[in-house]
Amino acid sequence: MALRPRASRRVESQSPVSLAGWLFADLALLLFIITIVVVSDFPAAALDDGPEETAPAPSPSPTPSPTPEPTADPGVEPEPLVFYVDSDAAGLVDGSESAERDLVDDVAEHFEPLIQDGSRVGFMLTFGGASDPGYGGSIAAAANEVMAEAYPDLFGDAPTRHFWTSSGKEAISTGTLQIELYLLVA
C-alpha cells in the first residue's frame, strides 16, 4: 500500500484567518507587557513594613482659635409634609383674586403652625390634579406663585416645582392640589 500525498490546504499569509491569529497574539503580548509595567510601578517603600516617619507634634497655640462658622446651608428633612387642598382650578389659572384668596385660606391651617415654629421650606413640590397634564401643571404653577407670595417668611427663596397628577385616582379630582413641603433642618 503506497501512501499518497495528502492534498493540503494552503492558507495564504494575507488571508483574514491568518491575520486574525497574529492580531490576537500581538494583543496578548501587549497586554502582558502593560501588566508587567503596571506591577513594577509600585514603589518598594509601600511594600516595606518598616517604621514610619512621624511629623513633629504641633506646639499648642497661646490663644484659642475661633470656632469656624458653618458655610453650607442646612439640609432638608428626608420626608415631606404632604397635604391635599381642593382649589378652584379655572380661577387659579385665570388669576382670579377670589380663587387665590380661597387657596391662601385653605393652606393657612397647614402653613401657620410651621411659621409659628420658625420652620422654613427647603423646596416645595405641587401636583395639580387634572385629566390633562398641561392643565394640571398650570394649576400647580399658579398655586405655587400664590403660596410663595402669600407666605414669604415660610418660603423665602425656596424653589418650587409644579407637576401634574391624574384626576380620577384615589381622592384626586380636577383642581385638587397635592402639596409636598420639604422643610429645612435647623
Image (cartoon, helix red, strand yellow):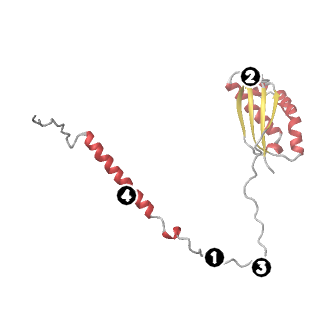
- The answer to whether marks 2 and 3 mark residues whose Cβ atoms lie closer than 8 Å is no
CB under 8 Å between discs 2 and 1:
no
Tag 4 and tag 1, C-beta contact below 8 Å:
no
The quadrant in which residue 55 appears is bottom right
Residue type beneath disc 3 = Pro
Identified at 78% across, 73% down, the residue is: 64
Element type where label 3 sits in the image:
loop
Which is nearer the eye, 119 or 81?
A: 81
Pointer 2 or 3: first along the chain? 3
Task: For mark 4, give the secondary structure.
Answer: helix
Which is more foreground, mark 4 or mark 1? Answer: 4
> On the image, numbered disc 3 is attached to which residue?
62
Q: Which residue is the site of mark 4?
A: 33
Cα gap from disc 2 to disc 3, whole angstroms: 68 Å
**The N terminus lies in quadrant:** top left
Which of disc 3 and disc 1 is earlier in sequence? 1
x then y, percent, for residue 100: 82, 30
Q: Kindly report the distance in space between the C-alpha atoms of the residues bearing marks 4 and 2.
A: 65 Å
